[in-house]
Image (cartoon, rainbow, N blue to C red):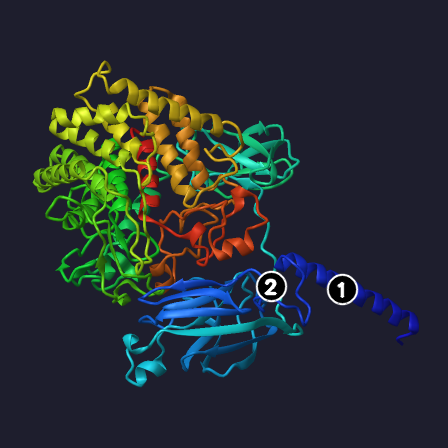
Amino acid sequence: MINKQTIQRMSSITLLVILLFTLFLSTALGEDLPEPGTELLNNGDFSGPLKFQLYKESGGNAAISIADGELLVDVSKIGRVTHAIQPYYDGFKLFEGCEYVLSFDAHSTLPRDMFVRIQLNGGDYHAYFEQNITVSEEPQHFSFPFVMGEASDPAPRLCVNMGITDTMTASGLQPEDIAPHQVYFDNFSLTVKDTANTVISSAEAENDPIRLNQEGYLPGNPKTAVIAGSDAESFAIIDNATGETVLEGTLSAPVDNPYAGEIDRVADFSALDREGEYVLQTSDGAVSPVFPVGEDVYENLLKESLRMLYLQRCGSELGSAHAGLYAHPACHSDLALIYGTDQLIDVSGGWHDAGDYGRYIVPGAKTAADLLLSYEMNPVLIDNIDIPESGDGIDDRLQEVLYELEWMLKMQAENGGVYHKVTGRGFPGFVKPQEETDQMVVLPISNTATGDFAAVMALAARIYSGSGIPELEEYSETFKNAAERAWDYLEEHKNDPGFTNPPDVTTGEYPDGKCDDERFWAAAELARVTGEDKYRLAVLESLTSGRVTAEFGWVEAGGYGLYAVLTDPNLSKDDEAYGPALNLLRDAAAKAGAVIHSHPYAVNRTDNYEWGSNMGIANDGVMLLIGASVLEDESLREDASRQLDYLLGENATGYCYVTGFGAKSPEHPHHRPSIAFGAPVPGMLVGGPDSSLEDPYAQSVLADSAPAKRYADSDQSYSTNEICIYWNSPLILLISGLTANH
């Protein structure tokens, strides 16, 4: 029988459950679930600072402002697609199963329809809620209840698509038929109506405390793991096959690591040199993922990171025999329009640059250079990465990079200058490559593109001429001549401004107003391949200018020029250029080393992780590896090895940052083929932490994270989880250099 005391106990238990449930909500969702009536938008009545922003593409042109307490969208050109003009609002959360009410007022000087949406802010940008509305000169009030029918989204977007609509085109209207007009909005409100059916998902598990290289270690390399937030004092290395303890050690003293927001200890098990598979176990019982030690631990990783470039090929069919799930017919093979003219040219071929389908000379040149240097540093034959050219006895690196180089030749104009890029005028949706059918546009010549082109063509001429492979040697003269023509253009256009996008183009800009480094790199490579004095003099001029650095990026490419100078067999150490080049490399290695040795994760970053920080860390590894060889300093090689360890799991997030590798790897990269085909392409290095929070998802989800943990495995987070060919390429070069002679 249930008595009064039982009821009281049940009430207490019920209250406790409710309290625990509320606490769980706070943990699982990052904050308390908003109560009914909560307003999610800030300044929806436009009485304060403007919180809405404006996106434009595909010929759409408009401006937004606050006018007499209303949001004014002043439309001058409606554009060719529905989302060509899109005022939007970011910075709120939606919870699965929760009911909301969206309301606002609107009127327009021109009667028209448009789409109000709350949508995924990334991926395929599909709508959680969408409503077509018609507005006129008479102000109207709109109110729409809706239920979030998908998984909770911490960073959706509220927007109004104000480009051309199906209703307009069905009535025979074209974009040019729509007159300029003004649309006004007021009293935007998004409120929580009912939380009764909200679905609570589990909180994301805490990162495993043991962070190490999940792909394993070469026998002679340093081997460390970072143990985060642990009170353990010792560790053991256990053979995964036999259970035998093969090594024991003491963890370092705890280190406060503010860049990662944790207290760290380090396990050093560099003495482990026996091949096998192991786990690291701490004295408090934490166990690491299984990791191998062996001479071939990076063989598959190297193959897949190279094959990723094949899967980025543009302009040719990728057959299922080699591309598998990602097979597709030829894409982007139509003639492209030279911007500002009516001239069409063939610029088919090359690699898609990143998560989009654009092709860009500047990052393409870096990628090509990394592959060529990968071959030069480690010419052991790689002929089995499963591309159409595999198995013919010619290194796949040299054949894959040839695909890019042949495209680059098409991008050189008659005057020797090189067009900056070829893309659509805006980014496509998250479609397969062949489904982007917009007119491709060739953007104007730039000095940075021309300088990078000259450098990589001269480098290719040298590598191919010395390959001993007749099929490749025949390209050398073509490459050298193209490089010299590009150099002549550079000399005639030294004072040209850097590249910027025209107003109606929104694809990747790759702006760089300073081309001293590209000019130095080009001069160094041309000096080496031709031996001509004019290039030697240009090298000396650059080295004494103070404007060259030892970086291996696309913005600062001076490191490639230093490599060309310091490894040139025609230069003695007494040459005028050698000493300044050596000093630049030595200083860069010392500066990086000071940071690397200052904190447990041993990378050249503290509180500042840039967009594409994983590329920067791979580039640092390349610089240190070259420094180890030129400066004959083995400690720099160990530092280079630690950069690879970071990329493969010894970092504050615990991710192996290469898709398809490691025990914990990215599954949702910002990459159109991966999204369109339904699975992440393997072997792609994602961007990694970006401490500046440069996309709406990162701003919503990562703002409270420490700099080293500002990474999100979400296709919405383009600033942390996109991929690029020139992020993969220094990974390829770093692995090749570290495994040379192993």
| Picture layout, residue 650 above or below residue 246 | below
Which disc is residue 17 wearing? 1
Q: Amino acid at mark 1?
A: Val
Query: Under tag 2, what secondary structure?
Result: loop
- The picture quadrant where one finds residue 134 is bottom left
Q: Are marks 1 and 2 in contact (CB under 8 Å)?
A: no
Nearest the viewer among 552 and 508 is 508
- The picture quadrant where one finds residue 435 is bottom left
Residue 490 placed where, x, y %?
18, 38
- The picture quadrant where one finds residue 10 is bottom right
Q: Which residue is mark 2?
A: 201
Give the quarter of the figure containing the C terminus.
top left
Query: Under tag 1, what secondary structure?
Result: helix
Q: Amino acid at mark 2?
A: Ser
Taking the spot 45% from the left edge, 28% from the top edge, the residue there is 222
Side (left or right) of 204 relative to 369 = right
Residue 240 in view, yes or no: yes
Instruction: Work out which residue is located at the far right of the displayed protein and give it.
Output: 4
Nearest the viewer among 19 and 13 is 19
Instruction: Work out which residue is located at the far bottom of the displayed protein and give it.
Output: 171
Give the number of marks: 2
| Picture layout, residue 212 above or below residue 172 | above
Instruction: Work out which residue is located at the far front of the displayed protein and give it.
Output: 68
Badge 1: few (under 14), some or many (20 or more) residues near its Cα, within 10 Å? few
| Picture layout, residue 742 above or below residue 348 | above
Taking the spot 38% from the left edge, 23% from the top edge, the residue there is 587
| Picture layout, residue 720 above or below residue 23 | above
Side (left or right) of 646 relative to 681 = right
Side (left or right) of 53 relative to 8 = left
Residue 717 placed where, x, y %?
46, 55
Distance from disc 1 to disc 2, alpha carbons, whole Å, reads 17 Å
Taking the spot 19% from the left edge, 54% from the top edge, the residue there is 349
